[in-house]
């Protein structure tokens, strides 16, 4: 092994050690992320397809609202248009059990905290 390759090995070794030294230290909490545009309950309302019928604003004007057989759609912004109760409990029941005989199917797949979050979200639209 000549001097040059020995020097090269030394350089590689040193740079290796330096990399090990550059292990990031935790000095503070990560920076606060920018504001999320879609809050969690609103995202669930959209992801579960509620907005397709009820509309993103809950006004009953979703993309499917004009379709045949859709039947009556309440306006979540107008308590007088609800047929099954306007309280968070009643709204939760409509979501979990659905409304038999209508296009409002049951959503037993949702966890109870998810149902509550969506129900509160709809309740705030009133
Ligand atoms: C395929 C269309 C459709 C979808 C999707 C849908 N709904 Fe409905 N929903 C309806 C219809 C139609 C009614 C009215 C039923 C009736 O005649 O009382 C209704 C009624 C309701 C009611 C009761 C309102 C009242 O009159 O008291 C609530 C609450 C509700 N939906 C929430 C939701 C939520 C939350 C989702 C998503 C998880 C959802 N719906 C998805 C069609 C839909």
Image (cartoon, rainbow, N blue to C red):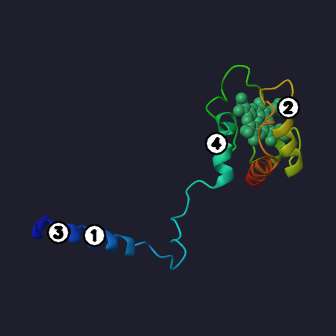
Label 3 and label 2: CA atoms lie apart by 80 Å
In the image, residue 31 lies at what x, y percent?
Answer: 50, 72
Question: Residue 46's mark?
Answer: 4
Q: Taking the image as four quarters, which one is ligand 1 found in? A: top right
Q: Is residue 87 visible?
A: no
- Where residue 59 appears, as percent x and y from the top left, is 69, 42
Q: Is mark 3 within 8 Å of ligand 1?
A: no
For the residues bearing labels 3 and 2, Cβ distance under 8 angstroms? no
Q: Earlier in the sequence, mark 1 or mark 4?
A: 1
Q: Where is 59 relative to 16, above or below? A: above
Q: Which residue lies under the disc numbered 2?
A: 99
**Residue shown at the point (65%, 53%) measured from the top left:** 40
Ligand 1 closer than 8 Å to the CB at disc 2? Answer: yes
Front tag of 2 and 1? 1
Q: Nearer the viewer, mark 4 or mark 3?
A: 3
Cβ–Cβ under 8 Å for marks 4 and 2: no
Q: Name, please, the residue furthest toward the front.
A: 1
- The residue lying at 73 percent from left, 25 percent from top is 70
| Residue, disc 1 | 13
Q: Residue at x 89, y 49 (%)?
A: 89
């Amino acid at each position: 092994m000549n001097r040059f390759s020995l020097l090269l090995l030394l350089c590689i070794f040193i740079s290796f050690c330096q990399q090990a030294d550059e292990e990031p230290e935790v000095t503070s909490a990560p920076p606060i992320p920018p504001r999320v545009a879609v809050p969690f309950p609103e995202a669930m309302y959209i992801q579960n397809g509620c907005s397709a019928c009820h509309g993103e604003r809950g006004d009953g004007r979703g993309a499917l609202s004009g379709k045949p057989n859709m039947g009556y759609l309440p306006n979540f912004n107008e308590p007088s248009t609800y047929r099954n109760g306007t309280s968070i409990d009643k709204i939760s029941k409509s979501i979990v059990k659905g409304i038999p005989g209508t296009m409002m199917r049951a959503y037993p797949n949702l966890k109870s905290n998810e149902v509550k979050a969506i129900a509160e979200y709809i309740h705030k639209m009133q």
